[in-house]
């Protein structure tokens, strides 16, 4: 029966223990170190080889003392080498975690970052307090999530567990849905679940905030090899993919033109500068639902040239606003 403690320590912790033993007066051998660390002798031998070959520590076996030693003084165990730019990026990444606050991803992500921070050398000279005051992330509208439901979705996606949802479409009552959850994605600060809907025999997009209840059916599933989120959203303006083919042409007035130039709104986009300082945006989309709402947000600064369906959709929506 194998010892339950085998491999219980992380490799770095084991090698630090070995380093301390080698720095002392004694000459430890692999068997003695294995007993202390509760791992196999082969594991210790691999650690010693890594310390010698990869960390370039002056490690050698002393046949007289029948143990390992350092052939010259080692002042400190080698630690992670990192530049000022890299540690700056690490702080930025930690701040970017704000969009995951409260989700099941928060704890493991923060834990990973803390471990990297603890492995940094003491010689880095950088005022992190200054960075804290110079960088921040803000979201315009933070999504409201039921954390138990979100956690259940995340685990089901990872473990490929089939689910039964009570899902509510906007303005409707909740209804039962049997799904195979394929993928959770954070798109523009909002969470979406992409899943195979058994009743509709197709991939559907679900907003976790509209899920009132979730339960496992006891079945597992195999994710379709043809599913690709990148391909699915390639011709969409957001998260809703359609089956249409629309060439969208929108002309923006000079006051809005710089805002349009400063972002890549869609992979297919092309921009053409206009003589009056405005700009013309062209895109190829599979659905007009989301781009219609986007155009409305620009008010009178945007004029739709193509297609007619988009012109009619925006005009009808604007008229409803005026009528209410």
Image (cartoon, rainbow, N blue to C red):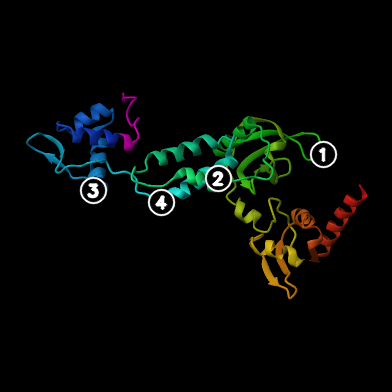
Magenta stretch: dominant SS?
Answer: loop
Q: Which residue does the image show at 64% across and 58% down from the upper left?
A: 234
Q: Quadrant of the N terminus?
A: top left
The stretch of residues the image draws in magenta is: 1-13
Q: Which mark is residue 96?
A: 2
Q: Which mark is residue 84?
A: 4
Which residue does the numbered mark 1 point to in the structure image?
171
The Cα–Cα distance between marks 4 and 2, rounded to whole angstroms, is: 18 Å
**Disc 1 vs disc 4: which is toward the camera?**
4
- Residue 11 shown in magenta: yes
The answer to the question of whether label 3 and label 2 lie on touching residues, with beta carbons closer than 8 A, is no
The first of marks 3 and 2 along the sequence is 3
Q: Position of residue 173 (x, y in %)?
A: 80, 34
**Disc 1 vs disc 2: which is toward the camera?**
2
Which residue does the numbered mark 3 point to in the structure image?
56
Residue projecting furthest to the left: 64
As helix, strand or loop, the secondary structure at mark 4 comes to helix
Q: Position of residue 156 (x, y in %)?
A: 59, 35
Crowd band around label 1 with a 10 angstrom C-alpha radius: few (<14), some (14–19), many (20+) = few
Q: Is residue 285 above or below residue 162?
A: below
- In front: 318, or 43? 318
The first of marks 4 and 2 along the sequence is 4
Q: Is residue 34 above or below residue 320?
A: above
Q: Is residue 218 above or below residue 143?
A: above
- Residue 306 shown in magenta: no
- In front: 103, or 113? 113
The Cα–Cα distance between marks 4 and 3, rounded to whole angstroms, is: 24 Å
Q: Is residue 317 left or right of residue 136?
A: right
């Amino acid at each position: 029966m194998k010892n339950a403690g085998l491999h219980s320590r992380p490799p770095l912790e084991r090698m630090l223990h070995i380093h301390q033993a080698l720095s002392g007066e004694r000459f430890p051998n692999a068997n003695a170190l294995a007993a202390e660390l509760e791992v196999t002798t082969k594991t210790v031998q691999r650690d010693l080889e890594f310390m010698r070959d990869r960390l370039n520590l002056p490690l050698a076996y002393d046949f007289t003392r029948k143990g390992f030693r350092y052939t010259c003084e080692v002042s400190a165990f080698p630690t992670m080498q990192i530049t000022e730019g890299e540690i700056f990026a690490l702080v930025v990444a930690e701040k970017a975690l704000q969009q995951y606050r409260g989700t099941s991803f928060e704890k493991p992500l923060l834990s990973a970052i803390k471990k990297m921070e603890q492995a940094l050398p003491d010689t880095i000279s950088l005022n992190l307090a200054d960075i804290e005051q110079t960088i921040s992330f803000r979201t315009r509208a933070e999504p409201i999530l039921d954390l138990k439901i979100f956690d259940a979705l995340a685990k089901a996606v990872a473990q490929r567990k089939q689910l039964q949802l009570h899902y509510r479409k906007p303005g409707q009552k909740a209804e039962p849905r049997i799904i195979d959850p394929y993928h959770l994605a954070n798109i523009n600060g909002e969470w979406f679940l992409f899943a195979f809907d058994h009743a509709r025999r197709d991939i559907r997009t679900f907003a976790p905030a509209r899920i009132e209840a979730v339960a496992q059916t006891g079945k597992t599933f195999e994710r379709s090899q043809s599913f690709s989120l990148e391909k699915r959203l390639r011709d969409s303006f957001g998260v809703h993919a359609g089956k249409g083919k629309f060439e969208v042409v929108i002309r923006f007035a000079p006051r809005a033109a710089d805002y349009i130039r400063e972002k890549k709104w869609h992979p297919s986009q092309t921009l053409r500068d206009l003589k009056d300082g405005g700009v013309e945006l062209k895109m190829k989309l599979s659905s007009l639902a989301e781009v219609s709402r986007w155009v409305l947000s620009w008010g009178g600064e945007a004029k739709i040239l193509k297609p007619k369906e988009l012109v009619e959709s925006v005009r009808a929506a604007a008229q409803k606003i005026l009528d209410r």
